[in-house]
Image (cartoon, grey):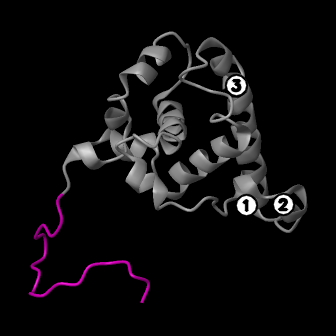
Amino acid sequence: PTGRGLAAVADVAAGQRVLELPKCVLLTHAAGQADTELWEAFSHVDGVDSDTQLLLFCMRHHKLPSSPWAPYFRCLPPAFTTVLNFSPQQLCYLYGSPLFDEAVRAQQQSQELYEALFPALSGAFPDIFPAETFSWPHFVWARSLLDSRDYSRSRWMAS
């Protein structure tokens, strides 16, 4: 067994609710707005969309021991195996497949986004975006976290 899943001790009817969570425990853009210091900084920065705000929120709270999200972040792996972490040699194994172009594009877009944000944010708001927390490896970690858990904006627009 993987340790994942649910076991029912009684029959469950089709459409019956078996698990309910309050929205406040979901890691979403809206929940991230509770960090007023971070959101105040966002109000002074142009072009940071909600997906990027959530990514930066995760980077910040991953390193804050007092964060209400600390227990969740502590149980996550220190690294993810995604195409964002692939070396050029590893990417070569994908050459000729549709995944190769997608992986290269994802790496380039991530690098471009990071370079558009840093070191500028760390310079403008050093207490909120300290350079040692908002590093490239940590950016890749946070992006991989969100990508691996399907935190895409379109998924949450309906809620």
Q: Secondary structure at mark 1?
A: helix
Residue beneath disc 2: 91
Q: Mark 1 near mark 3, Cβ–Cβ under 8 Å?
A: no
Tell me where residue 158 appears, x and y as whole percent. Answer: 29, 42
**Disc 2 packing (10 Å; few <14; some 14–19; many ≥20):** some
Quarter of the image where one finds residue 117: top right
Q: Where in the figure is residue 104, as x and y percent of width and height?
A: 78, 49
Q: Callout 3: 10 Å neighbours few (<14), some, many (20+)?
A: some
- Which amino acid is tagged 2? Leu
Tell me which numbered mark, 1 or 3, is placed earlier along the sequence.
1
Q: Judge from the rendering whether residue 142 lies leftward or rightward of residue 14; answer left or right.
A: right
**Mark in the foreground, 1 or 2:** 2
Residue 16: percent from left, percent from top: 10, 70
- Tell me, yes or no, if residue 98 can be seen here: yes
Q: Is residue 76 left or right of residue 8?
A: right
Label 3, label 2: how many angstroms apart (C-alpha)? 26 Å
> As drawn, which residue projects farthest toward the front?
65
Q: Are marks 3 and 2 in contact (CB under 8 Å)?
A: no
Badge 1, how many Cα within 10 Å: few under 14, some, many 20+? few
Residue 142 x %, y %: 57, 46
